[in-house]
Structure formats: C-alpha cells, structure tokens
Image (cartoon, rainbow, N blue to C red):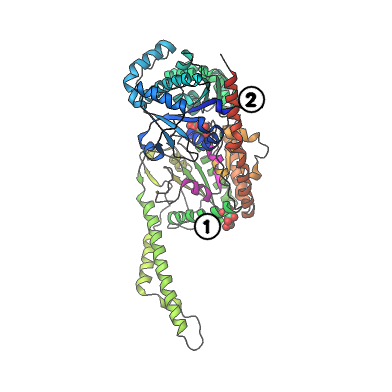
Amino acid sequence: MNENNTIENEKHILTEIAWEVCNQVGGIYTVIRSKVPTMVKNWGKNYFLIGPYAPKEAATDFEEAEFGHDVIDETLRICREKGLHIKSGYWLVSGRPQTLLFDHKSSFHQLGDIKYYYWQNHGIDFKNHDPLMDEVLAFGYMVHIFLSEMTRVAIDKKIKPLAHFHEWMAGSAIPNLRRDQVPLQTVFTTHATLLGRYLAMNDPQFYDHLPFMDWHKEAVHFNVEANVKLERACVHGAHVFTTVSEVTGKECFHLLGRSPDKILPNGLNIERFSVLHEVQNLHHKYKQVLEQFIMGHFFKSYSFDLNKTLYFFTSGRFEYSNKGYDLTLEALARLNHRLKEARSPLTVVMFFITRQPIQSINPEVLNARAMLDKINTNSNAIVEQIKNRLYRQAASSKGDHKLPNLNDMVDDYWKLRHRRTIQAWKSGGLPPVVTHNLVDDANDNILNFLRTANLINHESDKVKVVYHPDFISSTNPLFGMEYDDFVRACHLGVFPSYYEPWGYTPLESLARGVASVTSDLSGFGDYMKNVSIGDKKHGMFIVKRANKSFHEAAEELTNVMWEFTQITSRERIDMRNQSEDLSEVFDWKNLYKAYENSYKMALETYF
Ligand code: G6P
Ligand code: 1S3
C-alpha cells in the first residue's frame, strides 16, 4: 500500500481461483468472466486466473502460451518438475486474462493420500464416494502445491502474493495452506451456502428457522457432512471472508459460524451503445423474430392481436420454489382472472426458460413452426406472381387504367396450395404449453400447476404459457436467436426468488433495457432497496417476500404484473431507457472497489 492508501499492484501478484474459470456451470462463471476486463485493467501482468482443466471447453476457449512472468514461469517450472500437469495460456474472453488450467484428473492417483491427510489434519472424513468431491480434492491438492511454491518464489523477489478463492469447490487448498503457514494472504468468497440451498428448498419457513439451525445435524441429515465441513474450513481458514450480499451474509453467520468481513456485490461489464436509440431498435427487431414463433405456435388454433401482446419471461436453473416459479405461476393464474374480468384487450405470453430432462422437441410444435414457414413461402410466391402480372398489365393497359381483380392474377395451383397449407396447419386443439417432450411429464411441477389451475392456453385465457425446458441458443429451431436477443424481445422479466444469494437474471434484463421483478430475499433485490434510484420508474420492481406469506407475496406479484399491463407503449419506451441507465450502477468499474477493499484488508491482516 502507498500513502494514497491504494494497492501498489506491481508489488503483488493476484491469483483468482474458481471452479468456473473456462468451465461454465452456473452464475460464478458470469462473475469471473464479466469481471476480467476490469481486473486486467487494474492488475495488468500480475493477475492470473486458476481453474480446472475441462478439455472440451479448453479446446475452443483457451490458447496455450508462456507468459514471460518471472515468478509464475519459475513456479510453473518447479511444479512441472514435481509432476503437476498445468496448462498456461490465455482464456479467449474479453480481456484475455492470463490463465492456468490444472489437469486435476492427472492427480487422481494421489486421492488416497489426500483424503487420509485431510482426515488426519482437519478431521474431515471423505468416506462417501462422491465423484465431484474427488475432483475438488485433486484440484485443491494441485493448487496447494502451486501456491506454496509461488509464494516462496515471490517472497524471494520481494513480491507479496494474494489468492482469492471462490466457493468451497475451489477453496480446498485453504486449510492446508494455513496449516503449513504459507505466507500468502487469502480471500474466500462464497456465492451461497451448501446448507442454505438444501434447507430453503425443503423448509417454507427457512428464514424464520435459520437462527436456530444446528448445522451439523442438518449436514448429516442431507448427507453432505464432509462437504459442509470443507466449506467451513475454507471460511474459517481465509484471512478475509466475503460473500455476494447481506442476505447471504446472515446465512453465513448462522450456518457457517463466521460473518463476512466484506460484501462483494456482483456486477456486469456494461457496454453502452453510442447511439441512444439502439436499445429501442433492438427490442423492435427481436420482438419481430419472437412474433414468428408466436404466430406458428398459437395462430394455428386461434389468433390474438400482436400489437396488444406483452411478453413476460423467467429463466434459470430448475429450482422450483427457490427461483420462485411457484409464486410466478400463482400470480399468473390471478392475473389471467383479473384480465378476463376486466375484459382486457391484452394478451400476456409468459415464457418459462429453464432446463429439465427432455427427450426431444415436441414434433407438433416443430411442425407448426415449419407450416408457418411454408405459408410464408406460398405468400411470397403469390405476391411475386401478382407483382409481375400487375406490372405487365399496367404497362400495356389502355382505357380507364383501373386496378384489375387481383384474384384473377393468381394461378389456381397457388390458390389451392395456399388453401391446403392453411387447412393442414389450422389443427384445432389447444396450443401446447410445453415445447419439448419431458422425460417425466407426469411429475413436472410447472405442468402440474398449470393442469390444476386449468391455465393451458385456452382461447379465452388472457395469459398464455410457453414452457421451454431447455436453455435458448441460436441453433434452437424454435426461436432462432440467442438468449440475449430473446431477452431484448421481451417486456418484463419475472424473478421473485425465495433463495437467491445474488441473482444475475434481473440485472441482465436491466442491462438490456428490459424491466424486471425481483424479490427482497434475493441479494440483488436487497441491494437495490438501498440504491435510491432502484424503483418502478427504472423498470425495477421488488416483491416483498421477507416475513410475508406465500399468498401475500403472490398478491403483490399479481399487482406488479397487472400495473405493468396498464402502462402505455410510450411509458414502456421511457422505462427501457431508464432501465439501461440504472444498470450502470452495476458496472464492474464501480463495483471493483469492494474487491479492492477486500484485498487491502487481506494485506493488512496477519494471524
Ligand atoms: C421501441 C421500438 C418501437 C416500439 C416501442 C414500443 O421504441 O423501436 O418500434 O413501438 O419500442 O415497444 P413495445 O413492444 O413496448 O410496444
Ligand atoms: C450462485 O449461483 P446460483 O444460481 O446457484 O452464484 C451466483 C453468482 O454469485 C448468484 O448470482 C446466484 O444467486 C447464486 O445462486
């Protein structure tokens, strides 16, 4: 540190270790990846990412190279001599960070010893066979050796190293580093707690019961004793302990026995367009693409006015109550009722984008889409024919120059083909709710709710549902666009989570100018409450779930959705601009400060 109280980065090396470096599993990937440009800007050549070697992802997203960094090069040489398989190079994402991928599976032959010493030195017994835990321990073993050697080499060169670990899966080296008294300053960030996730899923009064939980009893109950003990060893071993939100901070205190020293909120790499109206144009463009799907899917059964249709969506991993799908469905059923009572001219189409075991896309859904494409081809052929004949007829016309009967300009062939295609497409029957064949259709929570509530895309329903049990990608034949573009096409994101340490989805919506709903139990929603501009005007709606019953929260969510249906198109345009403005608060350029503070604290902490 210098007299301005900023870190002199050239006197330090910062390594950031996460399971999701060049290996996408969930939200931590977004944290690490989106933060890279800011980290590289602040730390330059002294910033290194460390992750597990995942061959498939590395083959496309990683380029092997040497760094020409004296400390890291020497450390790599020593580690390779000791038999560790480490790949050095660049992760090919924005910012191109220097990255080390540890081929942890090459250390599997050491697992017997690794587990024995863990038990002997830290009292953690990895007796249950758990393939993921084997990977975690083998990775931690390599990280331990690497960081110990790196610290020795660095200190010799008067450089003080720092290591920042994310989540227990990447932190398994911490207990051994501390036991060996390696002079390396450590920060550990948890993005959830293992027990919190299990308990929230199984206890509707999780937050009331939290202060009275016996962590050990619960860990044994859920058969995750070794995992939780390892998580606690990371938390208690780190010099500085942090998490992503105040909400998860409380959970840490009760379930992990340590309050976080700092809160590190999650940000994004917010890229603003130089043209002010680009966000509006993109909405318009992608809404038109989405409308193609809507027509194919619904209009074979009945039609509605697309100019009076709003698109809502939710997305995320399938954690039915944790992600608030149950609340969303209840509120949609209520909204449907209200819109019907009010004889509203509007239609709301709600998309559930999540991932469940599937067999294939429902052939009926695919076929409807293909038929619409055929109608489009026919229509183009007919238009072309009329255009040519009309042009010729106009050029050679004599007399009154009146418009001829256009019907006569189309061949019978095309008339018949057009009629037959439409007939084959208009099947009757209700538009399917789910776009894929699910492996377990009968026990699917979303489908069962919709069946019970009879919210199954009747013509009279004002709220229609499209349940897409797979994540969206541009190769998907139904939507034909990337997830980001799908989000832009929509009007409202709905994410009223019950358990959500942070929650990127509403933030990602805002950054694309799409209004969204979150809950005060999510880390992001809770943070928003304290940002004075986080309000309705900016397209940010926060449903209260803390100390509220399910039905109270469902009523509030219904009110939010109802109010949203009542605003004008002009107001939606304003909201889109304001949402995008608000997202700037979450640019890593601003939120990096919290990371820097945790590094300062680590450098000042010796114990
Ligand atoms: C953007 C588009 C306009 C569209 C408006 C409202 O500004 O450029 O073409 O009319 O959004 O869109 P919405 O889908 O909310 O009615
Ligand atoms: C976690 O991923 P999740 O969906 O299991 O980490 C994310 C990144 O910090 C966070 O946004 C999310 O709430 C957590 O739950």
Residue 520 shows in this picture:
no
The N terminus lies in quadrant: top right
Q: Residue 519: x percent and y percent?
A: 58, 35
Classify 581 as above or below 41: below
Q: Earlier in the sequence, mark 1 or mark 2?
A: 2
Other-residue count near label 1 (Cα within 10 Å), few / some / many at <14 / 14–19 / ≥20:
few
Residue that badge 1 annotates: 306
- Could you tell me which residue is drawn at 47 percent across and 82 percent down? 394
Is 485 colored magenta in this rendering?
yes
Q: Is residue 200 left or right of residue 368?
A: right
Query: Which residues lie in the magenta part?
Result: 482-507
Q: Along the line of sight, which residue is nearer the eye, 60 or 429?
A: 60
Q: Which tag is nearer the camera, tag 1 or tag 2?
A: 2
Q: Gap between marks 1 and 2, in whole Å?
A: 61 Å
Residue 16 shows in this picture:
yes
Residue that badge 2 annotates: 2
Q: Residue 464: x percent and y percent?
A: 49, 49
Mark 1 close to ligand 1, CB under 8 Å: no
Q: Along the line of sight, which residue is nearer the eye, 149 or 294?
A: 149
Q: Along the line of sight, which residue is nearer the eye, 302 or 605?
A: 605
- Could you tell me which residue is drawn at 51 percent across and 83 percent down? 402
Q: Residue 217: x percent and y percent?
A: 47, 16
Q: Along the line of sight, which residue is nearer the eye, 312 or 86?
A: 86
Which residue lies most toward the top here? 120
Classify 36 as above or below 433: above
